Amino acid sequence: MGLLIRHGTIVTADARYRADLYAEGETVTRIGAGLDAPPDAEVVDATGKLIFPGFIDPHVHVHLPFMGTCAKDTHATASVAALVGGTTTYIEMCCPTRNDDAPAAYQLWKTKAAGNSACDYAFHMSVTRHDAATDAQLGEIVADGTASFKIYLAYQGSSGVDDGELYRILRLAKRLGAITVGHCENAVIVEHRQQELLALGRTGPEWHEPSRPEVVEAEGTNRFATFLEATGAAGCVAHVSCESALERAVAARSRGVRLWIEAVVPHLLLDRAYAERPGVDGMKYIMSPPLRDRRNQKPLWDALAQGLIDTVATDHCPLDTAQKLRGADAFPLIPNGLAGIEDRVNLLWTYGVERGRLDLHRFVDAASTRPARLFGLFPRKGTIAVGSDADLVVYDPQWRGVVSARSQLCNSDYNPFEGFPVAGRPSVVTVRGRVQVRDGRFVGQPGRGRMLRREPAYF
Ligand code: URP
Ligand code: ZN
C-alpha cells in the first residue's frame, strides 16, 4: 500500500517548499504538486504542517549495564518513545566493560534489539580495551555493518582506555574506515578529586561537577584531538558541555584534524543548579560530563547555530529515582545518565527554532542530516528525496504542551525536563512508509525496526 502526504511544507537541511509526497512501499518515489495516488493508498493531510526527514539520535543507551545497575529501557520502550518524539533512527552504544569479550557483547546487543525496536537503529561499538585479539574482532564487527567506534577516556577500570590503547584503537579505526566517538574526560584527575572531596565529607550530588570540572573535559577533548591528529583517524567528540572543551575541539578542526562535535540536549537546556538541589532531587541530574555553569549555554547554542557543533543527540540513559539513590552516601556512586530520546526534537524545536537561536534548516541538519552523513546513513536517511527511505515527520508547530513524566513512554519514573513547555510536536511519524505515530500515540507495528548496516568511510 502507498502513502500520500499532501498539502504540507517539506523542510530539509537546505530547502523549504510546498509539495505532496508519495511513498511506494518503503521508499519515497514521487515529490511534486497535486500528486494522485491509488485508491488504497493511505492519505495524510499535512495542511499547516511541516514535513521533516525522520530525525536521527546518534548517541543513545538502551541496554546498558553500568555503575552497578542497568538503564531502564528496553528496545521496545525506547523505540516507541523515540518515535513519538519524531526520532525514526537511533544509534545505540554497545558498551561492554573491559573484562567482556567484544564479539560476545556485540552479539548480545544485537540480540536484545532484534525484533524489538519499532524504529530503525544502528550501533557504535565501544572499544574498551586493546589486546592481541582486538584488530581481528573489530574487523569482523565493521564488516557486519557497525562502522563506528566509541571510546571512553573516563571510567578507567570499567570501560575507559589508556593512552596506548587509544592510539592503537584509532590506528585500527583509520585502517578499517570507522569513525570513533570519544567521551573526553581525564579519568585520573576525576578519580583524585572524587577522593579529595569525599575525604572532606563532601558527599552530595552538588560535588559531582566540582569533581570533574571544565578543565577535565578540555584536557580530554584536546587529548582526543591530538591522538586523532597523530593517527589521521576521524572522530566525533561526544556531548561537549562547556566553552573551554568546545574551543579545544574547534581549534583542532580548524587546523585540519578530522573531528566533528556533538552536543546533547541536557547541556543546552539544564545547568549545574539542577544537580545542586538537595538529596535525590539533585541526584536525578547526575550525568557526565556534568551539567555546567549556565554561562556555557550561549557559546554552545552559538556554535550549534554556526554549524561548529555538528549534531545534537541525547545520550539517552533512563534511570529511575531508586537507582540514583545508590549514591546517596557518596556522589561517585550515583549512576550517571539522563533520559531524553522522547523530548529531543520538541525541545530543540522550541528552545532553538522557536526562540530564534537556531535556523530551521540547521535544526534539521543537526538533528537528522548531519548524523546521517557522519555515520554512513545518508542519503537513505537524513533527507527527503526520491529514493530515500520514507521516514517522515509531519510536524505540528501549533501544538502546545508541557514535558512530563506522567505522559512519557520511556521507562523512567522522572523526566529531567519536567515542566518545560514545548511549542510543537510530531502529528504523524512514518518509518519506511508505514505510519507508526499519530497525534502523540504509537499506532504502528512494534518490532518493525531494522538494524542499519553501514559501509566503512575512509574519511
Ligand atoms: O552520564 C552519562 N553520560 N551516562 C551514560 C553513560 C555514558 O557516560 O556514556
Ligand atoms: Zn553516552
Image: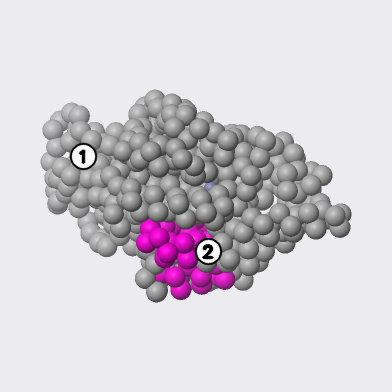
In this view, the residue in front, 354 or 338, is: 338
Seen in the image, is 226 located left or right of residue 406? left
Q: Quadrant of the C terminus?
A: bottom left
Disc marking residue 40:
none
In this view, the residue in front, 32 or 124, is: 124
Q: Which residue is mark 2?
A: 223
- Residue 408 location in percent, x, y? 55, 39
Residue 211, quarter of the rendered image: bottom right
Per the rendered image, the range of residues in magenta is 224-253
The vertical placement of 28 against 10, above or below, is above
**In the structure shown, which secondary structural element does the residue marked by tag 2 occupy?**
helix
Q: Residue placed farthest to the front in the image?
A: 132
Residue type at mark 1: give it: Thr
Indicate yes or no whether the magenta region holds residue 78.
Answer: no
| Residue labelled 2 has its Cβ within 8 Å of some atom of ligand 1 | no
**In the structure shown, which secondary structural element does the residue marked by tag 1 occupy?**
strand
Disc marking residue 27:
1
Q: Quadrant of the N terminus?
A: top left
- Residue 209 location in percent, x, y? 69, 59
Q: Residue at x 39, y 74 (%)?
A: 255
Crowding at dot 1, Cα within 10 Å, few <14 / some 14-19 / many 20+, comes out as many
Q: Residue at x 49, y 44 (%)?
A: 130
